[in-house]
Amino acid sequence: MLNEVVLMGRLTRDPEVRKTPNDISVCSFSIACERDIASKQTNERETDYFDIVAWRSTADFVEKYFAKGRMIIVKGRLQKRNYEDKNGNKRSTVEVVADSIYFGESKKNTDSSNAATSENAPKPSAESQDYETIESDDDLPF
C-alpha cells in the first residue's frame, strides 16, 4: 500500500520535544500550508494546518534548527492515532509521522539579526572590482 505525504509550510509554534521512558526523542509541532488557489467566495487563499510527529534523530534535528515561523519541508506518512481525553472520552486524530525533514528556505532569509538583506545591501561598484572590459568576443572560450 502507498502512504506518503510531502508538505511544505511554516511552523505555527516552536517544536515540543519529549523523551520516552526509554530515552527516545519525540518532537511534536504543527505547520501551516497555504493553498495554491484562492477561494471563489472570498478571493483569498485558505490555509490548512497539519500536526507532525518526528522521532529519534529527526526529532533532535527539528528541535535544534527550527522555530515558530520557519519554513519546513516534511516527508512522511499519515497515521491515525486513538487516545482518551482528560474526561475519559475516546478520541482519534490523524497526524503526519515525519521520516525526513528539510529546510524550506535558506538561513539568510530568516536571520533577523542580519540588518542588511540582499535587497537593501550595498552593491559593489564596477570600479571596485578587478574587471576587464572585453571589446570583442572572438577570443572567448564559449
Image (tube, rainbow, N blue to C red):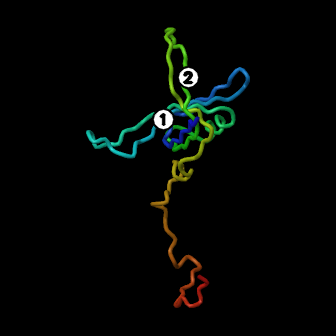
Where residue 31 sits in the image (x, y, percent)? 49, 36
Residue in front for this viewpoint, 81 or 2: 2
Give the CA separation, mark 2 to mark 1. Answer: 21 Å
How many numbered discs sit on the rendered protein?
2
Nearest to N terminus: mark 2 or mark 1:
1
Label 2: how many residues lie within 10 Å, few (<14), some (14-19) or many (20+)? few
Q: Quadrant of residue 120?
A: bottom left
Residue in front for this viewpoint, 49 or 126: 49
Write the residue at 72% across / 25% down.
23
Write the residue at 62% across / 29% down.
17
Label 1: how many residues lie within 10 Å, few (<14), some (14-19) or many (20+)? some
State the SS at label 1: loop
The answer to whether 73 is drawn above or below residue 88 in the figure is below
Where residue 42 sits in the image (x, y, percent)? 27, 40
Write the residue at 60% across / 36% down.
98
Q: Is residue 98 left or right of residue 45?
A: right
The N terminus, quarter of image: top right
The answer to whether 132 is drawn above or below residue 107 in the figure is below
Where residue 7 sits in the image (x, y, percent)? 51, 41
Amino acid type for the residue under numbered disc 2: Arg
Q: Where does label 2 land, which residue?
A: 81
Where residue 109 sits in the image (x, y, percent)? 51, 52
Residue found at the very far left of the displayed protein: 41
Q: Is residue 21 left or right of residue 97?
A: right
Amino acid type for the residue under numbered disc 1: Thr
Q: Where does label 1 land, which residue?
A: 12
Q: Quadrant of residue 138?
A: bottom right
